[in-house]
Image (cartoon, helix red, strand yellow):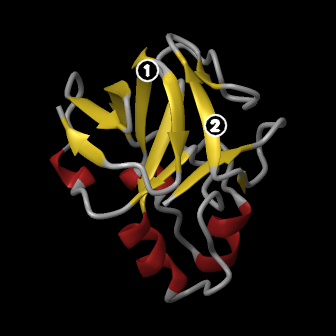
Amino acid sequence: MAVCRSDRKGIPKEDIRTGRLLEELGLEGDAHAGFAHRQVSLIAMEDIRQAQEKLPELRPGSFAENLTVEGIDLGESRVGRRIRVGKTLLEITQIGKECHTKCAIYRTSGDCIMPKKGIFCRVIQGGIVSAGDPVEWE
């Protein structure tokens, strides 16, 4: 659905539609690239839509995710499982994350999906990713 990037941490990301995933680094130009085992983050559009019931202005990138995907059940994620996005290959390294400071979305709605629904990956095989690319379990 979307490829999102920001040059600073702590802000929503913008949908750039196409980007380059760099092997063992992350999304080129993104502030979170190179962050150990959390090189790339994913959220399902289905989860964003559910959050939109409370905050209709939410969009891909609002949760600072790099890839917004649709039509694949991220609930089937487990650490070590691989997921192919276009011609790239990602390996899941973490599911959810601790939110040390409550983000603006949490303060507004009383909830944030990233700590429960965010999927973090390392880039095994890099390449170009674009909105509309197929996403499937390896």
Residue wearing tag 2: 19
**To which quarter of the image does residue 110 belong?**
bottom right
Would residue 98 be visible to someone looking at this image?
no
Q: CA distance from mark 1 to mark 2?
A: 16 Å
Location of residue 25 in the rendering, given as x and y in whole percent from the top left corner: 58, 14
Residue wearing tag 1: 122
Location of residue 117 in the rendering, given as x and y in whole percent from the top left corner: 38, 54
Q: Is residue 90 left or right of residue 36?
A: left
Looking at the rendered image, the disc whose residue lies closer to the viewer, 1 or 2, is 2
In this rendering, the count of numbered labels is: 2
Q: Report the front residue among 109 and 46.
A: 46
Q: Amino acid at mark 1?
A: Arg
Dot 1 crowding, Cα within 10 Å, few <14, some 14–19, many 20+: many
Instruction: Name the residue: 60% across, 56% down.
Output: 63
Q: Secondary structure at mark 1?
A: strand
Instruction: Name the residue: 22% across, 22% down.
Output: 80
Would residue 13 be visible to someone looking at this image?
yes
Location of residue 26 in the rendering, given as x and y in whole percent from the top left corner: 58, 23
Instruction: Name the residue: 44% across, 19% down.
Output: 123
Q: Report the front residue among 104 and 39.
A: 39
Closer to the N terminus: mark 1 or mark 2?
2
